[in-house]
C-alpha cells in the first residue's frame, strides 16, 4: 500500500497466482455518486485526506469494512435487521445502491480495443488495475479466459483478453501472457475467434476486414416492413451491429505500430502475411460455438460479400453509412453518451472518432461517460455489464424493507426516504422528440430504466418493479406522494404500450420480429439474441405492478389494465412446464422465474389451496430442496434449460425458493423453516452474507453477478416468513 500505480513494466515477472495485491493504493480509490452516476476516482494522497473512504468504498474494494458484530438474531426479523444494518452501509449518498456487475469477459476487451483504436492513451492507474483484473480472472490451469468468469477457456475469451493485456502494456514474455498465448495456439490461434472478436481485432489492425462476415449498413435502408429490417432485432443486437456496421463499411483500422505488428505475430499460429483471411470468414473454433451458423446465414453472408465487393454502388454505400451514422449520433444524444450498453458504447465512440476526430466534442463526451461503466473490486478494474444497477436494486431493496414492515419503523425512515427520492428523481419524464419514428425507440415517458434516467431506456420489468416500490411506499406506507398519480399513470401507459399479441411481455420493446430471424444470428457465442422474446420474469413483474397500481387507482384505463393482467396470466400458464416450473432468462434460473411467477399468480388469487398449477410449482420446488434445507442452482441450468443443482446450496436461490413458496401460500412450515435456518446460518456476525455463486444470466450462455441479491432477497424472505408465521423466537 502507499505505492503509486505500478509502471506497467513492473508487472513483468509476477506469476499468475500473485495478483491479489493491488498495483495501486486501494486506500485512494473513491466511488462518487452523482444522482446515480457512479464513477471511480483514484485520488492523490492530498485529495485522499480530504475525501474519506466510506464503508461502501471499502466493501467494494475488498478492504476490511470494520463493521461490528451484532447481537445474535433470535427471530427472522432480527436476521433481517442485522442484514439491513450491514446493507444500509452500502447505500450511496444519492439513495441508490451500486455493485460490481461483472461476469462477462468480453466487455473490458471491447472497451480497451476501441479505446486503443482511437489512439487515446490509458490512464496509468486504470491500466495497472485492468491488467491485474485480467490476471486474476485467467484460468489457473491453462491461463486462458472464457466467455464469462465461470465459463471454460475459449478462443474468444483468450484472444481478446490476451490482446487487451498487451494493449494495456503487458510484455509478451510475461508468464501470464506466455501461458495464455500457448493456450490460444493450442486452440488454433485467433483465426477461429468469433465474429465480434474478428471485428475488434480488425479495428486495431490485427485482423483483415475481408476475413469477416459482412455487417452491411445498407440493411438499415431496407423497407421497414421487411422481416429482416434491423429495427425488428433485439435492441442490444441492433445497438451493437449499428456502430459495427459503420466501422465495417469504413474498414477502419488503427494504423500499425510496433505493438500491433508484434500482436499480428503473437495471435496466430501461422505468419500473418500467409493467411488467406477471405477464406476464414466462417472459421470459428468449435468450442466457442453456442449458436452455429445456419445454411441460410452462410448463404446470406456469401451474397452480402459478393454484393459489397462487386455490386454495391458507391453512392448507396455512402448513403447507408450516412444513415447509420445519423442513428449513431442520435443514440449518443439521446443517452448523453451513456448509450444502451457496454458493448455498443465504445463502438459508438470509435464511430464518432472516425467521422469527427479525436478532438471532437463527441469523442470527449464519450471518454468522459465511459467511466460510468468502470468498476474497481478487490481483483482490479473491470467493465460493468451496464452503467450500474441503480434503479433495479433500489426498487428491490425498498420492496424487501416493506415486506419486513420496516417502512413504518423510524429507524429505516432515512434509508427508505433516500431510496424513494432516488426513484422519484430517476423516472423518465419525457419521450425523445423524434426518437420513436427515427430511432425506433419504445415509448419512454413514465418509464424507469435498469440503471439511470440518463441511460434512459425503458425496460418493462424495471418500470414495473419501480412502480411497485413507489406504490408500496406512497400509498400503502404513507410516504409523501413524490411520484404523482399522473406519473404513475405514465408508467402504466408505458407498461401497456409493451403488450404483445401473445399476452406476454418482453424486455425493452414489443416483440417486433419473427423467431425465424434467429437463423441470421451471426454472433456465434450467444443464443436467442436476434429478437425480443416474452419472458416469464418480465410478464409477471408487469402483472404484479398493475395489480398494485389497481389497488390505488381503480379508474385509469381500468378495462385495459384488467384485460392486460388476464392475458398475461394466461400467457404465464402457457409457458409453465409440465413439471410445474418456469424457466428464467435473467437470473439463475428456475428458482428466479418461479419467484416472480408465483407472486403474480398469488396476486390474482391463485394459490396453493385453490390452484393445481401452483401446487405443481410448489411440488417442483420442494423436490429441489437440498439436505441442508437450502436450494442451489448451477448456472448450467440456464445453459441446458433444465434444473441442475449447484454443488452447494446458495443463499440467493434459497431466498428465491422461499419467497416463491410463501407467495404461493405453501403450507409446509417445516420445509420453509429449514430454508430460513439455512439463510440464518450463513449470515455473518456483522449482518453480512458472503458472496457465493454467480446469480444472473443473459442470452442463455453468459453469466453476470448481482451481488446485492444476497442481501435483498434473504431480508425479504425473513420478512415474509415473519408475516406468515409470526415473528417467533426460532433461535436461542
Ligand atoms: C450481447 C451483448 C450486447 C452484451 C452486453 C450485455 C447486455 C446485453 C446485458 C448486460 C446486463 C443485461 C443482462 C440486463 C438486461 C438485458 C441485457 C443486459 C443489458 C435486462 C435489462 C433485461 C430484462 C431483465 O429482467 C433485467 C432487468 C434483469 C436485465 C438487467 C440486465
Image: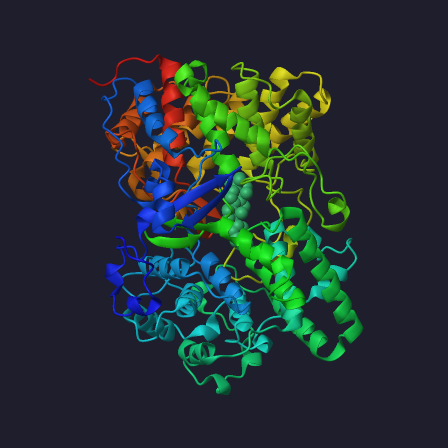
Q: Does residue 666 appear left or right of residue 12 in this picture?
A: right
Q: In this view, does 86 lie above or below 376?
A: above
> Which quadrant of the structure image shows residue 77?
top left
Q: Does residue 48 appear left or right of residue 307 in this picture?
A: left
Q: Is residue 666 above or below residue 714?
A: above
> Which quadrant of the structure image shows residue 518?
bottom right
Res. 659 visible in picture = yes
In this orientation, which residue lies closer to the viewer: 487 or 58? 58
Which residue sits furthest left?
Answer: 732
Q: Does residue 479 appear left or right of residue 159 in this picture?
A: right
Q: In this view, does 681 lie above or below 152?
A: above
Q: In which quarter of the image is the C terminus?
A: top left
Residue at 49% in and 20% down: 607
> Which quadrant of the structure image shows residue 305?
bottom right
Q: Does residue 729 appear left or right of residue 376 in this picture?
A: left
Which residue sits furthest front?
Answer: 46
Residue 226, position as x, y percentages in the image: 76, 56
Residue 3, position as x, y percentages in the image: 28, 57
Count of labels in the image: 0
In this orientation, which residue lies closer to the viewer: 384 or 375? 375
In this orientation, which residue lies closer to the viewer: 367 or 72? 367
Residue at 70% in and 56% down: 327
Residue 500, position as x, y percentages in the image: 68, 38
Res. 527 visible in picture = no
Q: Which colour scheme is used?
A: rainbow
Residue 217, position as x, y percentages in the image: 70, 65
In this orientation, which residue lies closer to the viewer: 525 or 6? 6
Amino acid at each position: 500500500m502507499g505505492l503509486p500505480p505500478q509502471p506497467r513494466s513492473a508487472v513483468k515477472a509476477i506469476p499468475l497466482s500473485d495478483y491479489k495485491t493491488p498495483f495501486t493504493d486501494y486506500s485512494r480509490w473513491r466511488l462518487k455518486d452523482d444522482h446515480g452516476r457512479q464513477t471511480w476516482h483514484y485520488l492523490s494522497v492530498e485529495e485522499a485526506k480530504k475525501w474519506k473512504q466510506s464503508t461502501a468504498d471499502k466493501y467494494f474494494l475488498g478492504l476490511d469494512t470494520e463493521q461490528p458484530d451484532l447481537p445474535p438474531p433470535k427471530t427472522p426479523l432480527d436476521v433481517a435487521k442485522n442484514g439491513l444494518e450491514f446493507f444500509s452501509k452500502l447505500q450511496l449518498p444519492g439513495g441508490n445502491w451500486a455493485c460490481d456487475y461483472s461476469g462477462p469477459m468480453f466487455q473490458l476487451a471491447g472497451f480497451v480495443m476501441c479505446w486503443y483504436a482511437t489512439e487515446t492513451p490509458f490512464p496509468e492507474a486504470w491500466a495497472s488495475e485492468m491488467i491485474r483484473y485480467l490476471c486474476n480472472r485467467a484460468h489457473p490451469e491453462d491461463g486462458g479466459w472464457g466467455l464469462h468468469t465461470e465459463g471454460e477457456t475459449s478462443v474468444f475469451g483468450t484472444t481478446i483478453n490476451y490482446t487487451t493485456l498487451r494493449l494495456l502494456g503487458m510484455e509478451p514474455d510475461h508468464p501470464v501472457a506466455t501461458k495464455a498465448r500457448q493456450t490460444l495456439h493450442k486452440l488454433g490461434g485467433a483465426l477461429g475467434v468469433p465474429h465480434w472478436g474478428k471485428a475488434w481485432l480488425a479495428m486495431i489492425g490485427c485482423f483483415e476486414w475481408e476475413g469477416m462476415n459482412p455487417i452491411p449498413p445498407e440493411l438499415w435502408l431496407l423497407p421497414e416492413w421487411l422481416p429482416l429490417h434491423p429495427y425488428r432485432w433485439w435492441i442490444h443486437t441492433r445497438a451493437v451491429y449499428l456502430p459495427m456496421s459503420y466501422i465495417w463499411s469504413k474498414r477502419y483500422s488503427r494504423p500499425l505500430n510496433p505493438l500491433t505488428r508484434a500482436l499480428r505475430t503473437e495471435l496466430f499460429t501461422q505468419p500473418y502475411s500467409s493467411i488467406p483471411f477471405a477464406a476464414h470468414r466462417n472459421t470459428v473454433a468449435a468450442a466457442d460455438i453456442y449458436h452455429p451458423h445456419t445454411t441460410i446465414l452462410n448463404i446470406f453472408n456469401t451474397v452480402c460479400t459478393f454484393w459489397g465487393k462487386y455490386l454495391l454502388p458507391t453512392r448507396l454505400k455512402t448513403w447507408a453509412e450516412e444513415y447509420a451514422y445519423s442513428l449513431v449520433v442520435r443514440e449518443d444524444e439521446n443517452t448523453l453518451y451513456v448509450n444502451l450498453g457496454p458493448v455498443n458504447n465504445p463502438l459508438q465512440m470509435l464511430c464518432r472518432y472516425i467521422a469527427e476526430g479525436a478532438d471532437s466534442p463527441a469523442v470527449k463526451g464519450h471518454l468522459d461517460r465511459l467511466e460510468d461503466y468502470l468498476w474497481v473490486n478487490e481483483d482490479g478494474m473491470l467493465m460493468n455489464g451496464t452503467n450500474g444497477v441503480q434503479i433495479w436494486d433500489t426498487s428491490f431493496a425498498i420492496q424487501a424493507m416493506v415486506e419486513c414492515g420496516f417502512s413504518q419503523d423510524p429507524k429505516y425512515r432515512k434509508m427508505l426516504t433516500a431510496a424513494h427520492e432516488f426513484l422519484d428523481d430517476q423516472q423518465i419524464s419525457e419521450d425523445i422528440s423524434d426518437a420513436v419514428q427515427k430511432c425506433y425507440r419504445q415509448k419512454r415517458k413514465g418509464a424507469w430504466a435498469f440503471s439511470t434516467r440518463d441511460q434512459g431506456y425503458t425496460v418493462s420489468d424495471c418500470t414495473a418493479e419501480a412502480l411497485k416500490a413507489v406504490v408500496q411506499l406512497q400509498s400503502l406506507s404513507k410516504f409523501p406522494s413524490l411520484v404523482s398519480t399522473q406519473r404513475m399513470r405514465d408508467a402504466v401507459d408505458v407498461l401497456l404500450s409493451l403488450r404483445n399479441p401473445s399476452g406476454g411481455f418482453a424486455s425493452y420493446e414489443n416483440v417486433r420480429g419473427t423467431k425465424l430471424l434467429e437463423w441470421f444470428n451471426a454472433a456465434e457465442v450467444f443464443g436467442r439474441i436476434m429478437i425480443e422474446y416474452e419472458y416469464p420474469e418480465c410478464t409477471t413483474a408487469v402483472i404484479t405492478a398493475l395489480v398494485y397500481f389497481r389497488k390505488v387507482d381503480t379508474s385509469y384505463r381500468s378495462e385495459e389494465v384488467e384485460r392486460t393482467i388476464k392475458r398475461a396470466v394466461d400467457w404465464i400458464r402457457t409457458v409453465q412446464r409440465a413439471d410445474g416450473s418456469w424457466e428464467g432468462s435473467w437470473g439463475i434460473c428456475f428458482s428466479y422465474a418461479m419467484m416472480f411467477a408465483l407472486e403474480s399468480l398469488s396476486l390474482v388469487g391463485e394459490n396453493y389451496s385453490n390452484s393445481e398449477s401452483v401446487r405443481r410449482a410448489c411440488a417442483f420446488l420442494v423436490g429441489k430442496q437440498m439436505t441442508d434445507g437450502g436450494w442451489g442452482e448451477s448456472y448450467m441450468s440456464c445453459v441446458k434449460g433444465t434444473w441442475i443443482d449447484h454443488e452447494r446450496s446458495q443463499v440467493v436461490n434459497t431466498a428465491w425458493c422461499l419467497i416463491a413458496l410463501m407467495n404461493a401460500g405453501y403450507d409446509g412450515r417445516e420445509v420453509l423453516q429449514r430454508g430460513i435456518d439455512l439463510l440464518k446460518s450463513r449470515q455473518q456476525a456483522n449482518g453480512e452474507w458472503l458472496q457465493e455463486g454467480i446469480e444472473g444470466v443473459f442470452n442463455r450462455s453468459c453469466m453476470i453477478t448481482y451481488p446485492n441479491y444476497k442481501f435483498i432477497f434473504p431480508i425479504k424472505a425473513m420478512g415474509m416468513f415473519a408475516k406468515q408465521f409470526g415473528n417467533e423466537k426460532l433461535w436461542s
